[in-house]
Amino acid sequence: MTIYSIKNNKLDEIHEAPFKLEREIQELFEANLAEVMGLKFVRSEFSIKNKRIDTLAYDEQAKAFIIIEYKRDKNVSVVDQGFTYLGLMLENKADFVLEHQVQLNSNLKITDVDWTQTRVAFVSPSFTENQVQATNFKDIAIELWEVRRYTNGTVSITPIKKSKSATSIKPLTQQNTELKAIADEIRVYTEDDHRSNASEEIYELYEQFRDAILNLADGIEIKPQKFYVAFKKDGNVACLEMQKKKMKIYIGAKAGALDDPKNIAKDVSNIGHYGTGDYEVQVDSDKDLEYIMSLIKQVVQG
């Protein structure tokens, strides 16, 4: 793909300005973790058991630690290294919690962390086809992110998505005791995991609302979590929680910030709930779908 800038109706080609050092990529991500990946920065260059972690981060939504590694070398096995770091974390949980306490002056406890949501992210200007295929499993806790810098000062950051036909990693780990232990403890949630919580009618309703949300704007991503499915563009714009006879929709707006003339969204800012956002709408049909989309669109448009 060729990229151009336009001035006075004239196109000027924009060239890539490659990162010379991994450290440049690391500094860029660490300074912008919340904006790029929705994570809280904990520590740079965290060493444990003779291993050095480039960036240690925390996902407050999933309540889990995330290890981020930066690569310019295309010839490494991201799966082997990823499982090494996952095992390192699961075997040394107290050390990671202590680091969070020290760096963020927090009261985090081991029991506060959802260790099943632990994951590793690799960031690189590009990945080989073998690396992409090696991580193309629907339940592997390894993410790939491509980052590229250009001569006009812009940067593109693209998470590599799993294919819709991606299979499970677990059959491949059964012959290795260490890999099996890691795969058994960590859980990567999918939309299908939430299907068991709902009746067929409610899941079909979910699909209607899902498609409508995705059509609100380009770049909205589906991020299944433990208790709900999040729809993310920068932050969460909506979270859908499926139940047997109804679906709860949490709209990602702060209390008092939603224009809701029909007053169908309940303020739950002071009520415990799973999804993010201060407004909840419960539905069991699609009769208010269009109106609810108008509420969510307010969040999408900022």
Image (cartoon, rainbow, N blue to C red):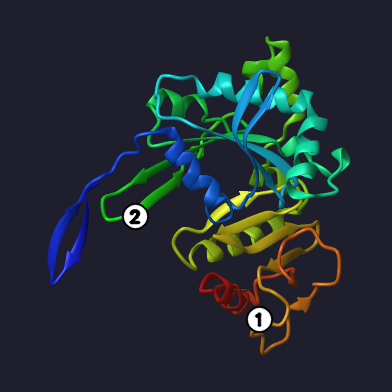
> Which of disc 2 and disc 1 is earlier in sequence?
2
Residue at the extreme top of the image, as rendered: 175
Q: Give the structural element (helix, strand or loop) at label 1.
A: loop
Q: Where is residue 67 in the image (x, y as percent from the top left)?
A: 62, 35
Relative placement, left or right, of 1 versus 55 is left
Judging depth in this view, the residue of 267 and 148 nearest the camera is 148
Residue for point 38% across, 27% down? 128
Q: Where is residue 83 in the image (x, y as percent from the top left)?
A: 63, 22
Q: Position of residue 239 (x, y in %)?
A: 68, 61
Q: Which quarter of the rendering shows the C terminus? A: bottom right
In which quarter of the view is residue 34 placed? bottom right
Relative placement, left or right, of 83 versus 112 is left
* Disc on res. 221: none
Relative placement, left or right, of 234 versus 114 is left
Q: Which amino acid does label 2 sit on?
A: Thr
Q: Which of marks 1 and 2 is in front?
A: 2
Residue for point 51% across, 46% down? 29
Q: Do the residues labelled 1 and 2 touch (CB within 8 Å)?
A: no
Residue bearing the label numbered 1:
258
Residue bearing the label numbered 2:
154
